[in-house]
């Protein structure tokens, strides 16, 4: 955390990033494989509407739908918004418009980017066409973007399509990333400052008298503000735990290892931490542990057994 302009207020840039992997059913598989083959598919509902992009269940009746149809690669802009500062991983690197395009033959609109010289060149009702990517893999990015088009009126209707292609796409992996600045606020700022001194501080609710660690600034049960600071721990009790067998990228910890919920002495909310200094298959509920700090650490690196007798179940059962 870095100090911000206001005294005692902390903030820090944070990134949450992971690959999102999902398998595809027959409808989504056909849609994405079709894009690879420069074909845009939709699905026809029981009442005759054509949905693009296609879905597997009718949004009105919830009935399963699989009647695929091919729609045009030209369409009409139904609404739009200008993006003057494209971000990383967005479709275009220069300013562009986000547009909803109702492709010819479809009854719903598809969200994508429109390559236009400026916002003055974009309008609701304008005609556009697909610009295909040079290399296509079976993803929505196979449509590189839309571009203005003045080649004629919309096609009359969608055409039935079997949805059969060679080498169909059966799964996708999409990188998910969220960049943001975290400002912890008064209560958690005090908690983080205490961790710098190898202390753990929570706050007590003035109504129910429970001590919450990390503090939230308000009691989640009573809904009242908290201000009374209480130092807890440093020792605590393992309430629940899991054995991790998959090594995380950029995490220099050998598997298997144990991640646990730990109820620090004096706290009424369990926090989580890694358990070390004991074989993973010897970790158990009720195990008494204490924090281990590294020289530059702003929080405990891990928790290790204290050698005390295990805590009685009744002392931590309310914290499971």
Image (spheres, grey):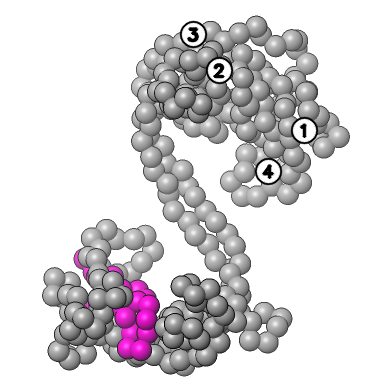
Q: Earlier in the sequence, mark 4 or mark 2?
A: 2
Q: CA distance from mark 4 to mark 3?
A: 36 Å
Would residue 59 be counted in the magenta stretch? no
- Of residues 51 and 246, the one drawn nearer to the viewer in this rendering: 51
Task: Point out the image quarter for the N terminus.
Answer: bottom right
On residue 72, which mark appears? none
Q: Nearer the viewer, residue 59 or 252?
A: 59
Of callouts 2 and 3, the N-terminal one: 2
The magenta-colored residue range is 256-277
Q: Earlier in the sequence, mark 4 or mark 1?
A: 4
Give the CA distance from mark 2 to mark 1: 28 Å
What residue is at 53 percent from the left and 32 percent from the top? 140
Determine whether label 4 and label 1 are within 8 Å by CB.
no
Q: Nearer the viewer, residue 115 or 160?
A: 160
Q: Nearer the viewer, mark 2 or mark 3?
A: 2
Disc 2 marks which residue? 50
Provide the residue designation for mark 3: 160
Q: Where's residue 119, x and y in %?
A: 82, 37
Secondary structure at numbered mark 1: loop
Q: Position of residue 231 (x, y in %)?
A: 43, 92
Residue 116 — which label? Answer: 1
Q: Which residue is mark 4?
A: 93
232 lies above or below 31: below
């Amino acid at each position: 955390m870095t100090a911000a302009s206001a005294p005692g207020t902390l903030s820090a840039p944070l990134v949450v990033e992971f690959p999102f992997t999902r398998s595809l059913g027959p409808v989504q598989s056909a849609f994405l494989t079709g894009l690879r083959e420069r074909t845009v598919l939709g699905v026809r509902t029981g009442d005759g509407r054509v949905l693009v992009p296609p879905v597997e269940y009718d949004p009105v009746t919830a009935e399963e739908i699989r009647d695929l149809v091919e729609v045009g690669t030209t369409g009409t802009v139904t609404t739009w918004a200008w993006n003057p500062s494209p971000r990383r991983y967005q479709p275009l690197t220069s300013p562009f418009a986000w547009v909803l395009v109702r492709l010819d033959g479809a009854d719903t609109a598809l969200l994508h980017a429109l390559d236009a010289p400026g916002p003055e060149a974009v309008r609701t009702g304008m005609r556009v066409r697909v610009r295909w990517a040079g290399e296509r893999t079976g993803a929505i990015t196979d449509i590189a973007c839309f571009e203005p088009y003045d080649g004629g009126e919309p096609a009359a209707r969608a055409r039935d399509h079997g949805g059969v292609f060679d080498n169909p796409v059966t799964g996708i992996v999409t990188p998910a990333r969220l960049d943001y600045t975290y400002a912890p606020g008064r209560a958690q700022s005090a908690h983080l400052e205490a961790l710098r001194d190898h202390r753990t501080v929570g706050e007590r609710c003035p109504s129910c008298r429970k001590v919450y660690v990390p503090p939230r600034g308000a009691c989640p049960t009573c809904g009242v503000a908290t201000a009374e600071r209480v130092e807890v721990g440093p020792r605590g009790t393992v309430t629940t735990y899991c054995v991790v067998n998959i090594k995380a990228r950029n995490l220099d910890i050998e598997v298997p290892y144990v991640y646990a919920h730990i109820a620090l002495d004096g706290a009424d909310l369990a926090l989580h931490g890694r358990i070390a200094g004991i074989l993973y298959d010897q970790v158990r509920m009720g195990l008494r542990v204490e924090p281990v700090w590294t020289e530059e650490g702003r929080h405990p690196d891990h928790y290790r057994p204290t050698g005390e007798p295990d805590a009685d179940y009744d002392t931590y059962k309310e914290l499971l």
